[in-house]
């Protein structure tokens, strides 16, 4: 069930330039349809099988966001149904998506900004080197920006600092990436307000809208 008051509050609070992705992973189709009927068009899924099933069952004008770590052997299933792939965290995954895309696919490059080693992503140095060496260049892939997840902590100063590092990395590489490079994805249910203050243009909110899993 959708928390309508929370959804409306978030929509009211976020600036016009920020995209809200409703994270619908593990939620039934009926919940997504309810949010759709309330005007939501961007939904995030992190399980490929769920993404495929929901894509086939729900309205065609939904923008499906493939979020979370994506294994290269799942790239073929995602490449031609995702509106945006959020977590390209290696050149290997980049190449797998490019191989299977039948039309140019929009992606975000994931940077590792958290103190937790369990989170995925390029370091800033690795990302810059990969771009300069042409390892992240293919006509079938449109790099739309960067994304990252902050450390799971109550320390707001640490979260803000990590988000700031992502925004700074985006600003460093933006010049050479073209006009379509316009997205900084950071911020979830617990920290999206901090993320927007630090320059996020896309937030992913699940539990605040659909309730805890």
Image: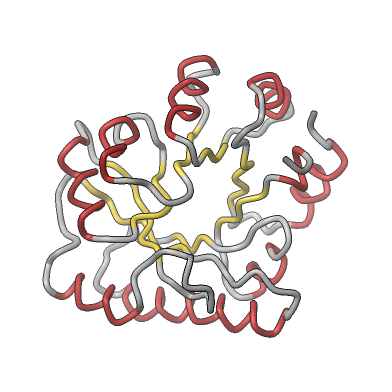
Q: Which residue sits at x=27%, y=51%?
A: 142
132 on left or right of 158 = left
Residue 82: image x %, image y %? 39, 35
Residue 101 lies, with reference to residue 169, above or below; the image says: above
Q: Quadrant of the N terminus?
A: top right
How far across and down, in percent of the image, does residue 181 sit?
35, 61
Q: Is residue 179 left or right of residue 30?
A: left
On screen, residue 164 versus residue 32, left or right, reads left
Q: Nearer the viewer, residue 213 or 51?
A: 213
When asked about the image quadrant of residue 26, the answer is top right
Q: Position of residue 212 (x, y in %)?
A: 76, 43
Residue 35 position within the rendered picture, expressed as x and y whole percent measured from the top left? 71, 29
Instruction: Tell me the residue at 15%/52% (across/down).
Output: 138
Residue furthest out toward the right? 5
Q: Quadrant of the C terminus?
A: top right
Query: From the viewer's perspective, is 35 left or right of 26?
Result: right
32 lies above or below 59: below
**Residue 122's quadrant in the figure?**
bottom left
């Amino acid at each position: 069930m959708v928390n309508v008051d929370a959804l409306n509050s978030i929509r009211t609070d976020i600036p016009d330039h920020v995209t809200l992705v409703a994270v619908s992973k593990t939620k039934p189709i009926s919940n997504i349809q309810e949010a759709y009927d309330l005007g939501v068009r961007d939904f995030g899924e992190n399980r490929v099988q769920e993404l495929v099933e929901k894509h086939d069952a729900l309205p065609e004008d939904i923008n499906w966001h493939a979020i979370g770590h994506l294994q290269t052997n799942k790239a073929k299933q995602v490449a031609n149904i995702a509106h945006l792939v959020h977590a390209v965290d290696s050149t290997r995954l980049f190449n797998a998506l490019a191989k299977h895309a039948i039309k140019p696919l929009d992606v975000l490059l994931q940077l590792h900004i958290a103190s937790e080693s369990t989170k995925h992503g390029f370091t800033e140095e690795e990302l810059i080197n990969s771009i300069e060496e042409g390892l992240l260049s293919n006509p079938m892939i449109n790099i739309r920006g960067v994304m990252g997840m902050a450390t799971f902590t109550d320390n707001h100063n640490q979260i803000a600092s990590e988000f700031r590092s992502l925004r700074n990395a985006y600003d460093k590489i933006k010049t050479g990436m073209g006009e379509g490079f316009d997205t900084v994805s950071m911020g979830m249910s617990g920290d999206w307000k901090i993320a927007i203050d630090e320059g996020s243009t896309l937030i992913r909110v699940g539990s605040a809208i659909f309730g805890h899993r």
